Image (cartoon, rainbow, N blue to C red):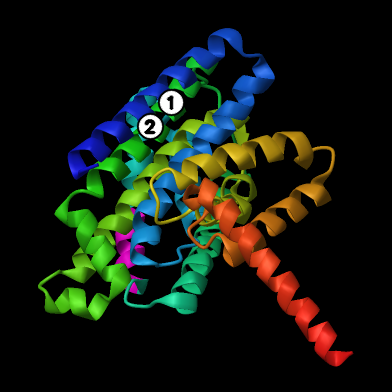
């Protein structure tokens, strides 16, 4: 298939998934809808994270910072602005913080960049805690203006599908190619005339805007928020795990992994939290060892390759045993 056919296929798949998700609240139970809402949240977070980090190979651990900024923006301004205005404001403030953060740390790579983004997340969380204690006299906020559950679900669904659609479109633009070029060889991309600093900052801000919008939408689900809840590092770590296990550089990998993680979370986390964490670790190890491209790279031929490799390993082991005898 050519590029146009791939584009049409991806759009049709996205349309089918959107239609299924729209129909889910009409026939699914409250438990199923709640699980779907969590799944959609991580689809939006991991797809937008993969668009920047999967392409450029920058390991950002700042997702929970942008998520928390959006959540607090919604908690503070939802009574003064409309629902959509609060979502957009959360996305805008998160993108603004990402621009400032990106200009400060995007010249670094690897472990240094990951550690600094995690450190800035902790810094933002403690700064919010300090200002809450200093000016409001308490830590945490009760959300008094709560939209209807259907409104929350449709908003998160729209954000998730928009994140996937953005990934579909941008991967076929010069901006997406520039991100891939930075991931392949940043110095060579600079030599070819790519303004890597601008591209990286814009991509980082785009990721932050989606995280902030999702945080603003999901904050009302809890009705009460505090810094340790919405700036929870686990949100950022799980986003990274979903993207890596699904395939950070792929289009549908984060969506597939988000579904797997949501099912595991709802079936194991409450009753068997240790088994849930062990399952995440096992999935990550298996993907690193046998599926470096993530779950999205899984094909029928992959199972055949595994079978042939395992038989060759067994034969080699038997041959060594015979030589030792």
Q: Is mark 2 on a helix, strand or loop?
A: helix
Percent position (x, y) of residue 133? 60, 51
Nearer the observer, 188 or 149: 188
For this rendering, which residue is in front, 85 or 212?
212
Q: Can residue 81 be seen in this view?
A: no
Residue at point 66%, 16% (across, down): 30
Magenta stretch, residue numbers? 96-104
Cα distance between the residues tagged 2 and 1? 9 Å
Mark seen at residue 50: none
Tag in front: 2 or 1: 1
User: Can you say which quadrant of the picture contains the C terminus?
Assistant: bottom right
Q: Residue at coordinates 62% horizontally, 13% vertically from top-left?
A: 28
Q: Which residue, given by chain and number where applicable, does mark 1 sit on?
A: 17
Q: Where is residue 62 in the image (x, y as percent from the top left)?
A: 47, 59
- Which of the 4 quarters of the picture holds residue 324? bottom right
Give the SS element for disc 1: helix
Residue 273 highlighted magenta (yes or no): no
Residue under circle 2? 161
What is the crowding at mark 2: few (fewer than 14 residues within 10 Å), some, or many (at least 20)?
many
Q: In this view, does 156 lie above or below 208?
A: above
Q: Residue at x 47, y 67 (%)?
A: 117
The mark that comes first in sequence, 2 or 1, is: 1
Label 1: few (<14), some or many (≥20) within 10 Å?
Answer: few
Q: Is the magenta stretch mostly helix, strand or loop?
A: helix
Please determine whether, in this image, residue 258 is positioned above or below residue 156: below
Residue 72 screen position, x and y as percent: 49, 41
Q: Residue at x 55, y 44 (%)?
A: 257
Apparent side of residue 182 relative to residue 155 in the rendered image (left or right)? left
Cβ atoms at labels 2 and 1 below 8 Å apart = yes
Q: Can residue 323 be seen in this view?
A: yes
Where the N terminus falls, by quadrant? top left
- How far across and down, in percent of the image, does residue 318 sit? 80, 77
């Amino acid at each position: 298939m050519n590029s146009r056919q791939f584009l049409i296929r991806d759009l049709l798949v996205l349309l089918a998934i959107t239609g299924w998700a729209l129909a889910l609240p009409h026939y699914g139970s409250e438990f199923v809808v709640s699980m779907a809402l969590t799944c959609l949240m991580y689809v939006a977070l991991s797809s937008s994270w993969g668009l920047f980090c999967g392409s450029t190979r920058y390991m950002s651990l700042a997702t929970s910072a942008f998520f928390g900024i959006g959540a607090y923006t919604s908690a503070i301004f939802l009574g003064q602005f409309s629902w959509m205005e609060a979502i957009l404001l959360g996305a805008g403030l998160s993108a603004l913080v990402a621009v400032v953060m990106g200009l400060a740390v995007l010249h670094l790579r690897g472990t240094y960049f990951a550690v600094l983004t995690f450190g800035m997340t902790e810094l933002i969380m403690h700064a919010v805690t300090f200002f809450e204690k200093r000016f409001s006299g308490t830590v945490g906020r009760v959300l008094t203006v709560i939209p209807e559950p259907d409104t929350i679900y449709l908003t998160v669904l729209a954000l998730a599908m928009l994140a996937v659609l953005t990934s579909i479109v941008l991967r076929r633009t010069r901006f997406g190619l520039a991100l891939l070029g930075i991931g392949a060889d940043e110095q060579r991309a600079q030599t070819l005339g790519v303004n890597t600093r601008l591209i990286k900052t814009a991509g980082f801000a785009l990721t932050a805007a989606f995280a902030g919008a999702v945080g603003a939408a999901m904050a009302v689900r809890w009705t009460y928020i505090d810094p340790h809840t919405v700036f929870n590092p686990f949100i950022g770590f799980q986003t990274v795990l979903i993207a890596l296990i699904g395939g950070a550089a792929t289009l549908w990998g984060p969506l597939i992994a988000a579904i797997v993680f949501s099912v595991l979370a709802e079936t194991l986390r409450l009753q068997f939290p240790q088994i849930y964490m062990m399952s995440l670790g096992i999935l990550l190890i298996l993907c690193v060892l046998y599926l470096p491209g993530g779950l999205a790279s899984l094909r029928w031929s992959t199972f055949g390759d595994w079978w042939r490799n395992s038989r060759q390993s067994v034969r080699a082991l038997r041959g060594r045993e015979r030589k030792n005898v």
